Image (spheres, rainbow, N blue to C red):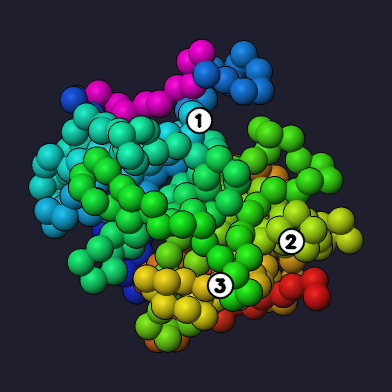
Amino acid sequence: MFFKNHGTDAEPVFLEGEYMQMGGEEFCVRAGYYELQSPRESCWGYLCPTVFDWNGDGLYDIVFSYNEGKYMYMPNIGTATNPILGTPRTIFIDGMELYGVWRVRPAIARIGDRVMMMIMDGENALHIYWQTSDTTVEDGGKAVLVDGKFITGHNNREETNVQFGRGKFNFVDWDGDGVLDLLVGTIKRSSYPSPERGLPESRRVLGYTGMQVLYFHNEGTSTEPRYAYPGQFLVNGKDKALGAHSNAPVGCMLGETSEGPNLVVGVESGKFMFFHRSQLSTVTLF
């Protein structure tokens, strides 16, 4: 859905949402025969879109994943003020469909003349790819912490395969140092960066109900990120539960932004919640 802001960035006022269309009809993804949890889920597509100028023509396209864990992009064949979505096109790597675990929103950023994309791969690890054409990417390797260890999101104690994935990623320079950091929306039983010592699970088992949005500070460079151990956001110093199954954060330049971007989080109830950065702090268990 598209929500038009007819206010300003500093004082946004959004109109009611309109369903995006493709070929004159509402664009809809359904699981069909590819359902993992129950037959009724065949009507759920778990569309996870990222708005980004993927083909470099100056117009915003949509890159998305869905319940099958595949990645596609829909070009904007209209204009900047009247976007029209073209037919989805599959993204490939080495002649095969780019594939990961399900229900993941990719993080995408243009860095210089290259485009970097992050997803969760088949091992539930954060994985970087570099765009080579409108429909192809090349492997950039798994994302790592400052100690060189891979970053995963699952919880060996409780998780089943259907609980893998579900990460919602966003590249943003959160601290204003000129390097892209990473925001991660999780489920309540996720365990980033590892099953043994991860958030939010390590706090959840102690009874804390944080907002399940994690901040990974990038201590490397935008092109070669090396992430510090994540912090879990608190709101006004307190935990704030936003649901169990998914949260989708975006660092945004809405509202008062003299100190940097603020945070919008889409939550499973269908609401979008705005947090000024002055309300936010991070906490770890250790």
Q: CA distance from mark 1 to mark 3?
A: 28 Å
Which residue is depicted at the point 64% across and 40% down? 164
Res. 171 in view? yes
**Would you identify the image quadrant in which residue 268 lies?**
top right
Q: Secondary structure at mark 2?
A: loop
The residue segment tinted magenta is 25-33
For the residues carrying marks 2 and 1, which lies nearer the camera in this image? 2
Task: Give the quadrant of the N terminus.
Answer: top left
Q: Which mark is residue 198?
A: 2
Amino acid on which disc 2 is placed = Gly
- Residue 278: % across, % down: 56, 81
Q: CA distance from mark 2 to mark 3?
A: 14 Å
Badge 2: residue crowd in 10 Å (few <14, some 14–19, many ≥20): many
Residue wearing tag 1? 67
Q: Secondary structure at mark 1?
A: loop
Which residue is depicted at the point 68% across and 34% down? 161
Question: As rendered, which of 1 and 250 lies closer to the eye?
Answer: 250
Residue wearing tag 3? 227
Amino acid on which disc 3 is placed = Tyr
Q: CA distance from mark 2 to mark 1?
A: 25 Å
